[in-house]
Image: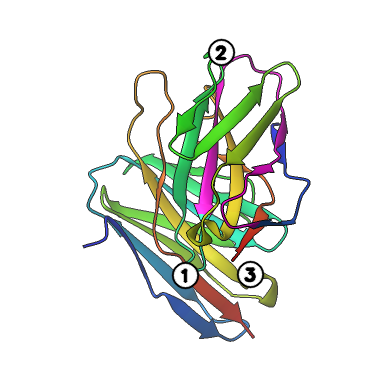
Amino acid sequence: DADVTQTPRNRITKTGKRIMLECSQTKGHDRMYWYRQDPGLGLRLIYYSFDVKDINKGEISDGYSVSRQAQAKFSLSLESAIPNQTALYFCATSDFGLAGGGDEQFFGPGTRLTVL
Amino acid sequence: AQTVTQSQPEMSVQEAETVTLSCTYDTSESNYYLFWYKQPPSRQMILVIRQEAYKQQNATENRFSVNFQKAAKSFSLKISDSQLGDTAMYFCAFRSETSGSRLTFGEGTQLTVNP
């Protein structure tokens, strides 16, 4: 079974609809992240959470909200989807940090979201 | 703020040959970490190699190695004996010690290995 799962894998929706993307992990990591990937822009951080009570905005949080329901679950919501939120969305997790701090992030399989 | 730049949107290489992907970054911090991630057509993000800035020695993982030039703020990835399975998008990423595990990614380089 995959360590980091995302649902749905693909979603097409209409402008103005509320959408929730879900992420679950079995790695036991405290830290979780949401990124979006756009062609030519790489991955950009939307929100991140270091534990259930600690949620922080990333570089592009406008139009998004998150919920950390448990250590293993981190959801991303688009309250009112718009076409320029069409992108590939990734959830990732990491441990507190290895010696030296070079902790690897483990990514889910991604959700392809299309907003019409 | 840190920035990461990959100036080669696309590259191609013949199978069994060597290719180098470029990455430059900008930071005022002295200690940080650099990563190369691979994204094959399956779109799964896979860590290829990691380098700690305080280590002089360049990291190596089998056919993958880096050329880390701290003064020049350059972090290139060399793939030796390229294989068809190396065809993927490659992302360079940066993390500083003060960024709380957050990664800053470059734009990506699409590598195609031709038979």
The chain carrying label 3 is A
The 10 Å Cα crowd at callout 3, few under 14, some 14 to 19, many 20 or more, is some
Residue B17 at least partly seen: yes
- Check the image and report above or below for A60 versus A30: below
Kindly identify which numbered label has been placed on residue A111.
1
Give B98 or B37, whichever is nearer the viewer: B37
Give the number of marks. Answer: 3
Whole-angstrom CA distance, mark 3 to mark 1, is 12 Å
Q: Position of residue A64 (x, y in %)?
A: 55, 61
**Residue that badge 3 annotates:** A85
Q: Looking at the image, do the residues carrying marks 1 and 2 touch, with CB atoms under 8 Å apart?
A: no
- Helix, strand or loop under label 1: strand
- Check the image and report above or below for A47 versus B25: below
Q: Position of residue A12 (x, y in %)?
A: 53, 84
- Label 3 vs label 1, nearer the camera: 1
Whole-angstrom CA distance, mark 2 to mark 3, is 41 Å
Q: Amino acid at mark 3?
A: Gln
- Label 2 vs label 3, nearer the camera: 2
Kindly identify which numbered label has been placed on residue A99.
none
Left or right: A70 as drawn, with respect to B21 = left
Q: Amino acid at mark 1?
A: Thr
**Residue that badge 2 annotates:** B56
- Magenta-colored span: B14-38
The chain carrying label 1 is A
Q: Which quarter of the figure is the N terminus of chain B placed in? A: top right
Q: Amino acid at mark 2?
A: Gln
Give B90 or A9, whichever is nearer the viewer: B90
- Helix, strand or loop under label 3: helix
Write the residue at 59% across / 51% down: B90
Write the residue at 30% across / 40% down: A30
